[in-house]
Amino acid sequence: MYDYLVVGAGLYGAVFAHEAKKAGKSVLVIDKRPNIAGNVYTEDVEGIHVHKYGAHIFHTNNTKVWNYITQFAVFNRFTNSPVANYKGELFSLPFNMYTFNKMWGVVTPEEAAAKIAEQRKEITGEPQNLEEQAISLVGRDIYEKLIKGYTEKQWGRDCKDLPAFIIKRLPVRLTFDNNYFNALYQGIPVGGYTQMVANMLNGIEVRLNTDYFEHKAELDALAEKVVYTGPIDAFFDFRLGTLEYRSVRFENELLDIPNYQGNAAVNYTDRETPWTRIIEHKWFEFGKDADGNDLPKTVISREYSSEWKPGDEPYYPVNDEKNSALYAKYKTLAEQESKVIFGGRLGEYKYYDMDAVIASALEMSEKLLG
Ligand code: FAD
Ligand code: UDP
């Protein structure tokens, strides 16, 4: 009999399993996928760590989480600085002095601020939708070239029909600073995320290709308690309805050239290009292999926004009113399951970044394991 059965070998499951083992508990981890690491899984292709389920950049302001995760990997100095490609014109992101200089030829912060002030005049009163919010933040030129097309592709809806808050978190700076995240700590684990999660699961029994629901009765009988990190609605057999997700589709290509776009992320901000962005994975690790040699080939992933339907890979929870209300009902059911703890992005139906998932798993570990 195990003390804990952990369903899901993603970050939440790995943190919890590691802490449980450290506390002297016996743990069995299962995952239905053929690999550990959940959505942060990186696959080795020609020496390149390919982020199979979407590009993952670790960033946090939480020193406790940073100290915790760096036990399992050394992080490199990668800083996320995406480039926007609008019909062949390139702009720096997030919006900063480099962007304003390229857009308007302005040189000083004062000139940039004046240009934005002039363009935002068309919005009077509180912005009512994403279009108005964007124009009020950075003016119409930037809205038209760098926001409108990208956002409409990503969300499949007109910017006038999207809530203003989505765009509010994008930084706007009057300094020459291309660092996308305002985070104290940032980087990519050297050796890939899969190796980092393998280090967390070191010495713990893991069974892959094992779907919890296909063997539920046998698996439940093996453990005192279950930590479940799969979709909460699936646990209850969708009896109250299906929670919705936003999905993305990736098209990966191995190219026999050393450098495709010179940057990890290039956003295609026009409406006509069908993909939202292209990731070139080698640049997360500066184009070098483990021994510091230049990698001769490259892998790129075109990212397409796609409509999610039941049965697809769940990516981003949609925390709108309808889905939040349905989640609240499932949560009430979950609270009645005395043997099962629900955690993680799918178990809690939350738009968690990696650092928040680690923090949440640590908190649960402290609560349960003392
Ligand atoms: P998961 O990684 O999804 O793990 C859950 C695991 O449970 C999966 O492996 C799944 O196979 C398994 N499972 C589910 N059901 C069953 C079942 N029935 N039986 C057995 N196993 C089951 N965060 C950042 O901080 N920075 C980023 O740049 C970033 N980029 C992202 C990009 C994309 C496209 C996405 C989707 C997310 C991104 N995130 C990013 C968020 C990050 O992926 C999550 O915070 C983190 O992976 C969540 O870990 P988890 O363990 O909760 O979930
Ligand atoms: N956005 C944009 N142009 C860009 C990048 C982002 O208009 O080049 C907008 C878009 O509406 C997006 C939002 O900013 O939904 C948040 O961007 P972020 O990159 O944080 O989105 P995520 O990767 O979390 O979907």
Image (spheres, grey):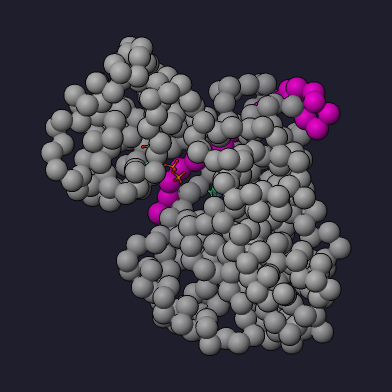
Quarter location, residue 37: bottom right
Residue at image coords 36%, 37%: 150
Residue at image coords 39%, 61%: 319
- Whether 207 is among the magenta residues is no
Q: Eyeballing the image, is 88 above or below 197? A: above
Residue 223 visible in rendering? yes
Classify the position of the C terminus by image quarter: bottom right
Q: Nearest the camera: 197 or 303?
A: 197
Relative placement, left or right, of 123 versus 237 is left
**Outermost residue toward the right in this view:** 203
Q: Eyeballing the image, is 292 above or below 127? A: above
Quarter location, residue 106: top left
Relative placement, left or right, of 173 versus 47 is left
Boundaries of the magenta span? 289-308
Residue 7 visible in rendering? no
User: In x, y percent, where is residue 11?
Assistant: 66, 58
Relative placement, left or right, of 41 versus 303 is right
User: In x, y percent, where is residue 305?
Assistant: 43, 46
Q: Nearest the camera: 155 or 227?
A: 227
- Whether 300 is among the magenta residues is yes
Classify the position of the N terminus by image quarter: bottom right
Relative placement, left or right, of 349 versus 133 is right
Q: Quadrant of ligand 1?
A: bottom right
Q: Nearest the camera: 359 or 35?
A: 359
User: In x, y percent, where is residue 182?
Assistant: 50, 38
Residue at image coords 54%, 62%: 345
Q: Nearest the camera: 49 or 273?
A: 49
Q: Eyeballing the image, is 192 above or below 284? A: below
Residue at image coords 26%, 44%: 130
User: In x, y percent, where is residue 200?
Assistant: 77, 57
State how many labels appear: 0
